[in-house]
Image (cartoon, rainbow, N blue to C red):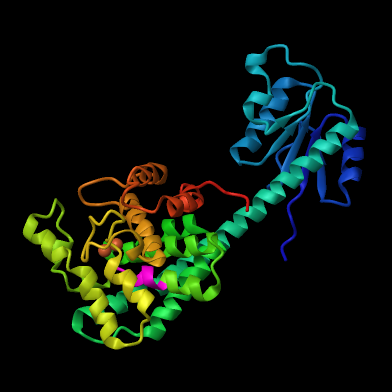
Amino acid sequence: MAQESFVLIVSDRPDLARDLARGLVRVIRSRVLTPRVALPVEIPLIVLVDVDDEANAADWLSRYHAFRVPCLYAPRKAAADAATAPHLVGATRTLSAGATRPIMLAALFDLIDAVRQARVQTARASVRASLVNGLAGQAGLVIQGAFEAAETGQPVKAAEIDSGTEVILEAVSDCGIRAWLDTIAKHDSQLYQHSLSVAGFAAAFALELNFNRADQMRLAKAALLHDLGKARIPVSILNKPGKLDAEEMAVMRTHPDIGADILAGQGEFDRTMLDVVRHHHEMLDGSGYPAGLSGDRIPDLVRLVTICDIHSALTERRAYRQPLPHDEAHGIMCRMSSKLDLVLLKAFAPIVLRSAGYALVD
Ligand SMILES: [Fe+2]
Ligand SMILES: [Fe+2]
């Protein structure tokens, strides 16, 4: 493993500098410099500037600020002119004037901790980003395969759908819904991206509701395939940049039945899953399609996917409009109280916040 960088102590008080270096010895290497020498070639982890002359102190702080190295400034006295005070030049933290050795040492330990933690977080974020990228790539191939099979009349491979669903659950539970959405947003097919997005929301919802593993799979899988029937909708209608006319809308509205019939014909997908595919556009007040189901005739699993589907659609980019922010989309859905299940919408709120980038503590 590469040796960690060091703390650079720039001080015109050699005794104090040596004491500080001795205090740091169990934690990190340090180097002591008098303020008149040249910069060391190696970049330090942190710099402490303890220099009486303000102009010289400002010079050191600005040099390392340019390299984004966190600097601790220990002024000997309060700045005579606040506007030109050295701490404005680039100190990450400035101690009170005339700080004692123990205070300087404690401040150094704090800053070392903060920098190390930030580095660990950056490293974790980069591991997470590459993990979620790989998983999104795998899931993307699975949904592409399913749509291509549906379009050409080939069987949709149930085992592949299972493994794609597992991949989505893994990505969302390990890396979070926000990272998942950020990653799949790069997908060039709006249809595949939408399927991956709805499945991601469904996975996050299932985890939020503490579903057992079988139910997590059932919900996320149904969400992944909910729009499968669009594989047989003409591209001119599917990708029309403007509003659909009545005739085109009638064609578009056939996709739930088409998708459910394709999967039912294979005999490998259970009834609850087929219900989601066939009824994800039904509304509680009976205004939805294709069957105009209302109230209790719409199963819970369908209601859950409907919420994920609408939230996803509102927050996705379309040729004719910008994506809505997550909180705005949720607000619109909460005002659809006669159509959507408000209890489930409330339970969906933590996912809305996570999608918007809030880190919630469980
Ligand atoms: Fe749909
Ligand atoms: Fe959809």
Whether residue 134 is visible to the viewer of this picture, yes or no, is: no
Q: Is 177 located above or below residue 72 in the figure?
A: below
Q: Kindly identify the residue that appears in the image at 82 percent across and 51 percent down.
A: 29
Magenta-colored segment: predominant secondary structure = helix
The x, y position of residue 345, in whole percent, is 43, 51
The x, y position of residue 362, in whole percent, is 63, 53
Residue segment shown in magenta: 221-226
The x, y position of residue 187, in whole percent, is 33, 63
Between 343 and 213, the one nearer to me in the picture: 343
**Ligand 2 located in image quadrant:** bottom left
**Where is residue 75, by image quadrant?**
top right
Q: Could you tell whether 102 is left or right of 211 in the image?
A: right
Q: Is 44 located above or below residue 140 in the figure?
A: above
Q: Does the magenta stretch include residue 111?
A: no
Q: Is 22 located above or below residue 51 in the figure?
A: below
Q: Kindly identify the residue that appears in the image at 46 percent across and 69 percent down.
A: 168
Whether residue 257 is visible to the viewer of this picture, yes or no, is: yes
Q: Could you tell whether 164 is left or right of 227 in the image?
A: right
**Where is residue 23, by image quadrant?**
top right
Between 103 and 264, the one nearer to me in the picture: 264
Numbered marks: total = 0
Between 10 and 353, the one nearer to me in the picture: 353
The x, y position of residue 43, in whole percent, is 68, 47
Q: Kindly identify the residue that appears in the image at 85 percent across and 22 percent down.
A: 98
Query: As drawn, which residue projects farthest toward the top?
Result: 80
Q: Could you tell whether 101 is left or right of 219 in the image?
A: right
Q: Kindly identify the residue that appears in the image at 27 percent across and 61 percent down.
A: 282
